[in-house]
Amino acid sequence: MTTTTVARRANAVPSDPREHARAIAEAVDEAWHSRYGGSRIEVPMSVVAVLAVLAREAPDPDQLDRVGEMAERLDHEGFWLLIQRLWCEFAALRPDLNPRTKHLWSWIDDEPDETTQRAIHAVGQAALRRGVLGRFGPDGWGDYDLLGVLLQQMKSHGGRKGIGQFLTPVDVTELMGRIGGPKEGDRILEPCAGTGTMLLGAARSMREKGLDPTACEWWANDLDPLAAALCAVNVHLWGLGWRVVVGCGDGLLDQWMHEALEHRQIAIDEMRRAWQVAMQIRAVRTVLELPWPESPLERHMRKARPKPPPPPPPAPDSSTFDADAVFRQGQLF
């Protein structure tokens, strides 16, 4: 670990997760609107969400720091390729959430133009400088709704008013969830979940009592596709387990539950088939000893690696400098 890494980790991560989330949200909002200003706020939300997932899933903090340093050195094209790779890995990790999270990553199916790439790069650098990777492991962003704070920051007051959407403050929603006090084996249903903060409150209440939230069944829904997508990422960040269904529909009807469950199973089956094909391709290439081509992301990462220090200057050639002879002649000292 470098001295720069230690300093960044110490300075960029406030002890209070609320303060930290607000700092990230403000920096990302400023970076996005100063470099691009587009209305597709799912793009910067997508960048922050997948970086938070990276912080949770990294095997150790030192490796996470190395990835963070590499991400900071990537150019705008390489950075969006990194975001694309991270979302592909999350889709394989949690296929059950793909029907909802797709709203966050569908934009990467088509290569964004250079202006958007530069805005994505600016957003990512802002989040990295504010320490989005500084909260490592399952407990990193597992106790606060970073994405909910970011959504509130990026949705202007006029935009919320125009669609009749007023977001309940994150702290209030979490408190409401803590009041319920679910027990292991319960089914928790939230038809107007937003980004899911009430579920976080319920899960934290269970953990404080020594209970396991993964023993519950969690059902969440929201009419806003972006809020539902962020909720789907959050249930993973918060460690609610695999007994999770996230829908997007009218919370006053129960149709969203049937559709969400059906789409969830379809996504799992599709990923299972994709894995089978990938394993077959890997086996064939291994048998035939075919090399794996370098991907565009790997090429950018190779170029972004720090250059090795120059070699030390060569020692003087003994044929041109004879210290003993010079000493005998009284010329050395």
Image: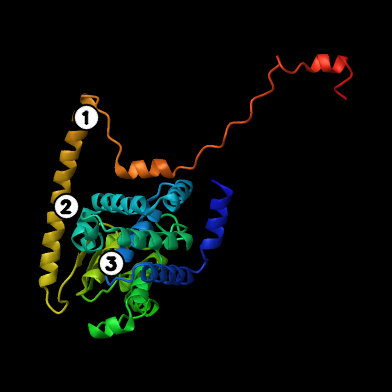
Q: Secondary structure at mark 1?
A: helix
Q: Which residue is mark 3?
A: 42
Work out whether 299 lies above or below 89. above
Q: Position of residue 45 (x, y in %)?
A: 32, 66
Q: Amino acid at mark 1?
A: Arg
Q: Position of residue 309 (x, y in %)?
A: 56, 37
Neighbourhood count class around disc 2 (C-alpha, 10 Å): few under 14, some 14–19, many 20 upward: some
Q: Which mark is residue 285?
A: 1
Which mark sits nearer the N-terminus, 3 or 1? 3
The percent coordinates of residue 263 (x first, y second) are: 13, 60
Mark 2, residue position: 268
Which quarter of the figure has residue 332? top right
Task: Residue at 27%, 72% (x, y): give it.
Answer: 39
In-image side of 129 versus 216 (left or right): right
The nearer-to-camera label among 2 and 1 is 1
Q: Of 64 and 44, which appears nearest the observer?
A: 44
* Residue at 43% from the left image edge and 45% from the top image edge: 304
Q: Quadrant of the C terminus?
A: top right
Tell me which amino acid carries mark 2: Ile
Colour pattern of the rendering: rainbow
Q: Quadrant of residue 325?
A: top right
Residue 102 shown left or right of residue 135 in the figure: left
Nearer to us in this view, 76 or 192: 76
Q: What's the amino acid at mark 3?
A: Glu
Whether residues under marks 3 and 2 lie with C-beta atoms below 8 angstroms apart, the answer is: no
Q: Earlier in the sequence, mark 2 or mark 1?
A: 2
Quadrant for residue 200, please give it.
bottom left
Which of labels 3 and 2 is toward the front? 3
Q: CA distance from mark 3 to mark 2?
A: 24 Å
Kindly tell me whether residue 239 is visible in this rendering.
no
Within 10 Å of disc 3 (Cα), the crowding (few <14, some 14-19, many 20+) is many
